[in-house]
Image: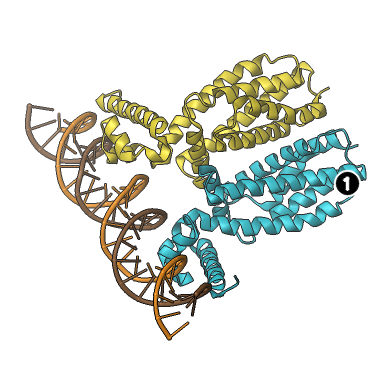
Chain colours: A cyan, B yellow, C brown, D orange
Amino acid sequence: MSGLRERQKADRHRRIIDAATALFREAGYEGAKIEAIAAQAAVSIGTIYNYYQNKGDILGAIVSLEVNEVLNAGRGVVASPPANVGDALDTLIGIYIEHSLNYLSKEMWRQAMAISTQLPDSPFGQAYTALDRDLTEQISALIARLQQIGLVRSDIDGPTVGELIFNNMNMMFIEFVKRDEAKIPELRAAIRRQNRVLVAAIGV
Amino acid sequence: MSGLRERQKADRHRRIIDAATALFREAGYEGAKIEAIAAQAAVSIGTIYNYYQNKGDILGAIVSLEVNEVLNAGRGVVASPPANVGDALDTLIGIYIEHSLNYLSKEMWRQAMAISTQLPDSPFGQAYTALDRDLTEQISALIARLQQIGLVRSDIDGPTVGELIFNNMNMMFIEFVKRDEAKIPELRAAIRRQNRVLVAAIGV
DNA sequence: AAGAAAAGTTGAACCAATTCTAAAATTGAG
DNA sequence: CTCAATTTTAGAATTGGTTCAACTTTTCTT
């Protein structure tokens, strides 16, 4: 079961991801040729296509790592949120946004988003949709937590509001990565301003 | 000024768009080879690239036609909206959604959206961003109109709410075109449900 | 109306992702 | 230890978007 073959496979996966991460950041997604990734990972082109269906799936694997890290970081906020609806949302969303450029450049985000809408049924396309759903659910979980605490009216539909907040945030993030000169603080401020309207509607 | 050259140019533009529209619908975006579009339009490959920077820009020109039509149709609603905030939003958004598949298939939308995030600085990328902005402004204009009429509180920030509504709608539309089996009535119902939360917050 | 300049057209060549092939290497079972 | 099954490898072939240098057509000038 846990033979040499397993270990080598895992090792090749890691080498490919490491090489691709480095090259995507250095040369951009388009600029990172499969041939170069293969060389840097010390595998052949054929092996890369044995592990990933296409170039986009390699980027997809990197995006998954990033988003899962962010989801993990978010759990703490959901468990014990700030005692104020606006701050609670801002804190959670802040974590998402502040972490977003740790591993992925804006250009990598653009490519990842593009591929996920272009090929929604590819492995990566489906994974990306699942990640969006997980983020939406985490926001909904925060709303539910705030309802428990008594900071949010108990008669509002938490999942619907969570979806609304996620959709708006995600669209703002898309516009953010589309403009290289856009800055994180302004993005956060704009989202906070938008969420204020909602907070007014759902706060007790 | 209005010489032969002008007429030929306009004619070639039209032939290319007509050929591309037909082939995109028949064979899908990927399936429509530039060579085939050129043949059907009775021009050479080189000429196509003289008129459009790349394949995506051809699709872009088609998308622009569609969205501008929708913007036109929306003007009527803004001018004399239904006497109820929820219905007014639903009517405007309904126009956007119901028209959306007239000329463009879901696959064409997916490609168009992907390209606009992938290449935000290409002619089409910029045009698409401008179209999004126009739609956002039209929703904001509707909110402003409803404030005039006295159906929406005058102390809320119209443009912010318009942006929020557009962003949510757009994201829902993206998910809609990503799933071939998704149906228009359900999309509209989901958006209406989400907007109810906002309507509660901004209505008088 | 001729010749030159400007603008536009053409398709063959280029490039990088992906697929395919046959040979070589590695592993696990018996 | 040996063999069969599975993987990896190198590289050639394929494919389709994009580029470019040579050729045409249109317009302008005189």
- Relative to residue A8, is residue A193 depicted above or below? above
**What residue appears at the point 69 percent right and 16 percent down from the top-left corner?**
B81
Task: From the viewer's side, name the closer residue of B108 and B69.
Answer: B108
Say left or right for B135 vs B126. right
Q: Chain of mark 1?
A: A
Instruction: Give the number of callouts.
Output: 1
- Relative to residue B49, is residue B137 depicted above or below? above
Q: Quadrant of the N terminus of chain B?
A: top left
Image spot of residue B78 (x, y percent) = 65, 19
User: Label 1 amino acid?
Assistant: Asn
Task: From the viewer's side, name the closer residue of B70 and A121.
Answer: A121
**What residue appears at the point 68 percent right and 40 percent down from the top-left corner?**
A167
Secondary structure type for disc 1: loop
Q: Look at the image and tell me whether residue B34 can be seen.
A: yes
Hey, which quadrant is residue A106 in on the image?
Answer: bottom right
Say left or right for C30 vs B58. right
Image spot of residue B68 (x, y percent) = 52, 25
- Relative to residue A180, is residue B2 depicted above or below? above
Crowding at mark 1 (Cα within 10 Å: few <14, some 14-19, many 20+): some
- Relative to residue A23, is residue B137 depicted above or below? above
Image spot of residue B71 (x, y percent) = 56, 23
**What residue appears at the point 59 percent right and 34 percent down from the top-left corner?**
B176
Task: From the viewer's side, name the closer residue of B100 and B154.
Answer: B100
**What residue appears at the point 55 percent right and 23 percent down from the top-left corner?**
B99
Q: Quadrant of the C terminus of chain B?
A: top right
Say left or right for A106 vs B20. right
Q: Look at the image and tell me whether residue A100 can be seen.
A: no
Residue under pointer 1 = A84
Image spot of residue A154 (x, y percent) = 89, 36
Say left or right for B138 vs A48. right
